[in-house]
Amino acid sequence: MHRFGSGFRPLGSSFFIFSLHKKVDYIIRQVCSYSRFQTEARGNKVVPFLVQNTGLSDVLEADAKQIAMMARDTFEKDGPLLLVASGRDTISVASSIKRLATENVFVVQIQHPRSRLNRFDLVITPQHDYYPLTPQAQKQVPWFLRRWITPCEPPDRRVVLTVGALHLADSATLKSAASVWHDELALLAKPLLVVNIGGPTSSCQYGVDLAKQLTAMLPNVLWSCGSVRISFSRRTPEKVSKILFKEFSTSPKVYIWDGEGPNPHMGHLAWADAFVITADSVSMLSEACTTGKPVYVIGAERCTWKFADFQKSLRERGMVRPFTGKEDISKSWSYPPLNDSAEAASQVMKALAERGWMIHT
């Protein structure tokens, strides 16, 4: 909950609507940290409203009406409401609130709503969401289907483009994770190679073929590793994880997280010296690329459509390299770390300032 100061017209309350991810809380914390908000349990100018649900499509229209009414009723006293919505299942509710209280709310939508962007004040979305508008993409779609492929128009001034996905892995979070996981990870032999396995998607399909590819290549780099830690996501097919368990479970250098106990993901990001990550996961790649450490990708050749465009973008920025099995993991390389969340937060603050709204610093 945040107290907003004076100067320009103050933003009164902060509304958060989000579904499956904590990234909205993170982006708001970024907005707060960039303006040095004072965080309080409850301030005399703040009456926050929080909706946390994995099925926000079930939120009743009455809820939007109630929030809009609150925005209008408290505007003169507390100023406008900042509403951040994440996920496509929040689009209806967030746009309804904007329609019902146009002058009393500032709505930020995270993830592209696909159409009618004028329903929101800002939209934060990865630039590869606009891949369908590129000449290369147009050639892949029959002419009679192109009108149905969204988005249909280039980004306008209300769109904030990111390279990857928004996430929680900022420097403060990783510093905390390094402390939490110190006893387990700090003493591991260096360099520490972390291997993150995701799962197939419609635009990046694979199965046991990728697992077999990894089991053929990873042993070739073990000589250059002090230790290796492998972890799976919830999307990893069991047939894939079984192959890797069978191949590496007896290797003295390799530890495989079996899903039991605390998830070491943040600890891995903090302590790893290099990463090998499957190409399907925009989130895992975005997180790893915020560290500035070497990131090797396996399976990028299997990606199509905007997933392939995302891979191309990371390669052009020097953030990732294809994993070939010929690497010397002890030889490090670096790049300017990805900083999407902080940069998006800065754009939110800029847009607020253009309206004459400013948070007290």
Image (spheres, rainbow, N blue to C red):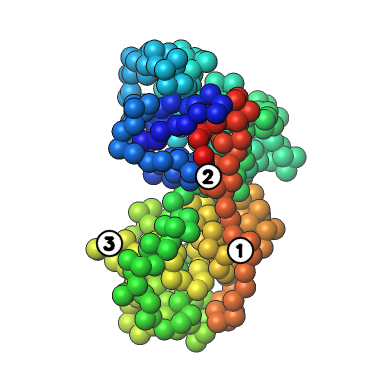
Say left or right for 11 vs 265.
right
Query: Which residue is the site of mark 1?
Result: 320
Q: Amino acid at mark 2?
A: Tyr
Residue 352 placed where, x, y %? 57, 30
**What residue lies at 44% left-to-right and 51% top-to-bottom?**
168
Query: Which residue is the site of mark 2?
Result: 34
Q: Nearer the viewer, residue 127 or 250?
A: 127
Label ID, residue 262: 3
Q: Secondary structure at mark 1?
A: strand
Q: Residues within 10 Å of mark 2 (few under 14, many from 20)?
A: some
Residue 271 placed where, x, y %? 43, 71
Say left or right for 308 vs 237.
right
Residue 34 at least partly seen: yes
Residue 287 placed where, x, y %? 49, 57
User: Which circle, 1 or 3, is nearer the viewer?
Assistant: 3
Distance, label 2 to label 1, CA atoms, is 29 Å
